[in-house]
Amino acid sequence: MIKISTINEAISNNEVQALDSSIYNGHEKILFCKDTSTNLKAIIAVHSTKLGPGLGGCRMWDYKNQNEALNDVLRLSRGMTYKASITGLNLGGGKAVIIGDSKKDKTKKLMESFGEFVESLGGKYITAEDVGMNPADMKDIRTKTSHVVGTPKEMGGSGDPSIVTAYGVYMGIKGSAKFRWGNDNLQNKKVFVQGVGKVGGFLIDYLKKDGCEIIINDIDIEKMSEIASNKNVNIVTENEMFNKSYDIYAPCALGATLNDENIEALKCEIIAGGANNQLEKEGFHDVLLKKKNILYAPDFLINAGGLINVYSELKKWDNEKTLRMTENIYDTTISILKRSEEEDISTHKAALSIAKERLNK
């Protein structure tokens, strides 16, 4: 059986608990998607289509409950709106989450069912790859909808966006270094990369070429050990990772690592990573970082490389132009950090104000 519910219907049916309306107000569409024949449980959130269709990846994660999934997709979809805006792309913001273990629950039929729900939105939402998904999944989704990007290159798609995401984060790190230290030479800088999935793994490669000393941690012990061995980097335990001193902290796992506890313990000069929604409380933890004189490169700016990559698929750009566009993150990072300093506001607020200015135009 296939079922689509709105946010209000989901609340009245006790599928999710009532949230503070400020969390979902401003979203154009929130759909709860169920297909009992494939065991699909997904949420699609379209935050804005002011600048174009809402484009954002689909994340498959084993959430504790639907409320946790709902909070995640709403924050992510809103972040995509600001990411597209600040990067100068004619796109809106959207996101999807599939509730389940990508290693155990993912099937071709499940992907196809999700594709049918995407198709039902008529192009208001374009899906792509995110955590727990890969280009092969995009290929399966593509059998049911044309509103998907990030399909394999042999199908004419842009392929895995992770390497371009990592390149944008690297540009953000270089720009942050230039602003903080007067030059972007990263030789011998100590960098803690938290999360060594595809983005974190590619970021390590870029940083290694610059001569950085790299320390890593990941919840997947086996993957972490493999990366440490193959890339010749050091491991820090979960208990110790926020008690060590670093030049740069690069969060590349899930969000909310910049919270009361971790910020209190953090000893670094720059935070710049690929994870989405790094601030647990926007408007509070970004201010706390400023008070501690820790330079924070806003996540929705410097992790925009993946979005640029899939946008290039829609625009038929070649790889060279995609990388040139991603390199602009370096200059944009510096300009936002300057604005933060000049206006005496947090870097997150400075970035948000620029993104909103374009939206309001």
Image (cartoon, rainbow, N blue to C red):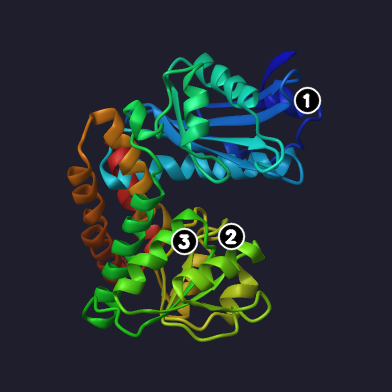
| Mark positioned earlier in the residue sequence (3 or 1) | 1
Residue at image point 55% right, 59% down: 253
Tell me the kind of residue under disc 1: Ser
Frontmost of labels 1 and 2 is: 2
Given residues 59 and 67, the one toward you in this image is 59
The location of residue 110, given as percent across then percent down, is 64, 25
Residue at image point 24% right, 61% down: 330
Residue at label 2?
256
| Mark positioned earlier in the residue sequence (2 or 3) | 3
Q: Kindly identify which numbered label has been placed on residue 244.
A: none
Residue at label 3?
200
Given residues 108 and 278, the one toward you in this image is 108
For the residues marked 2 and 3, what is the alpha-carbon distance in whole angstroms?
Answer: 17 Å
Frontmost of labels 3 and 1 is: 3
For the residues marked 3 and 1, what is the alpha-carbon distance in whole angstroms?
Answer: 40 Å
Residue at label 1?
12
Residue at image point 31% right, 47% down: 86
Question: Is residue 275 depicted above or below 296 in this figure?
Answer: above
The location of residue 139, given as percent across then percent down, is 47, 27
Question: Is residue 185 depicted above or below 164 in this figure?
Answer: below
Label 3 SS: helix
Q: Contact (CB < 8 A) between labels 1 and 2? A: no
Tell me the kind of residue under disc 2: Ala
Frontmost of labels 2 and 3 is: 3
Tell me the kind of residue under disc 3: Gly
Q: Is residue 198 visible?
A: yes
Question: Is residue 153 depicted above or below 222 in this figure?
Answer: above
Residue located farthest toward the right when viewing the structure as drawn: 14
Quadrant in which the N terminus appears: top right
